[in-house]
Image: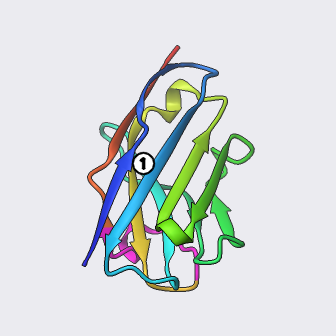
Amino acid sequence: QVQLIESGGGLVQAGGSLRLSCVASGRTSSMYVMGWFRQAPGKEREFVSGVNWSGRSTNYADSVKGRFTISRDSGKNTVFLQMNSLKPEDTAVYYCAVRYSLAVLTRPRDYEYWGQGTQVTVSS
């Protein structure tokens, strides 16, 4: 079992920044992918970004490329999502997820463990 705890969400004006963090505990290993997803009201959960175990391979949704940056501290089982130039359409609950694989995949069903989520609200 893996427990994931997200933090860093909040209310910010358009153009502002937030930094999300996710700490994993329990059955942790160096060989896993950590990802961020988000879900807005009435919409399906969508992939935002992911990073492999080494931190060298990352993937981003087109909607956040150039604005969001994912990084991880494997020694502390922590992943970060730096979100800059935020837009109202970024408003959603952001979830951290883990999969035990080398590949950074983008479908929610490919991830085994999930956090409870943290709310991000961007006002116009």
Q: Is residue 112 magenta?
A: yes
User: In this orientation, which residue lies closer to the viewer: 123 or 21?
Assistant: 21
Tell me where residue 73 appears, x and y as whole percent: 57, 64
Quadrant for the N terminus, please: bottom left
Which residue is at 52% across, 59% downward? Answer: 79
User: In this orientation, which residue lies closer to the viewer: 112 or 9?
Assistant: 9
Q: Is residue 87 above or below residue 6?
A: above
Q: How many marks?
A: 1
- Residue for badge 1: 38
Tell me where residue 23 appears, x and y as whole percent: 40, 59
The reply to whether residue 106 is in sight is no
Q: Is residue 79 above or below residue 118?
A: below
In which quarter of the view is residue 40 placed? top left
Which residue is at 55% across, 71% downward? Answer: 74
Question: Colour mode?
Answer: rainbow
User: In this orientation, which residue lies closer to the viewer: 9 or 36?
Assistant: 9
What amino acid type should be assigned to the residue bearing mark 1?
Arg
Q: Is residue 40 magenta?
A: no
> Is the residue marked by circle 1 packed among few (<14), some (14-19), or many (20+) residues within 10 Å?
many
The reply to whether residue 8 is in sight is yes
Q: What range of the chain is rendered magenta?
A: 103-113
**Residue pushed farthest right?**
66
Q: Is residue 48 left or right of residue 5?
A: right
Which residue is at 40% across, 64% downward? Answer: 97
User: In this orientation, which residue lies closer to the viewer: 100 or 25?
Assistant: 25
**Residue pushed farthest top?**
124
Which residue is at 41% across, 71% downward? Answer: 98
Tell me where residue 32 appears, x and y as whole percent: 49, 80
Mostly what secondary structure, the magenta segment? loop
Helix, strand or loop status at disc 1: strand
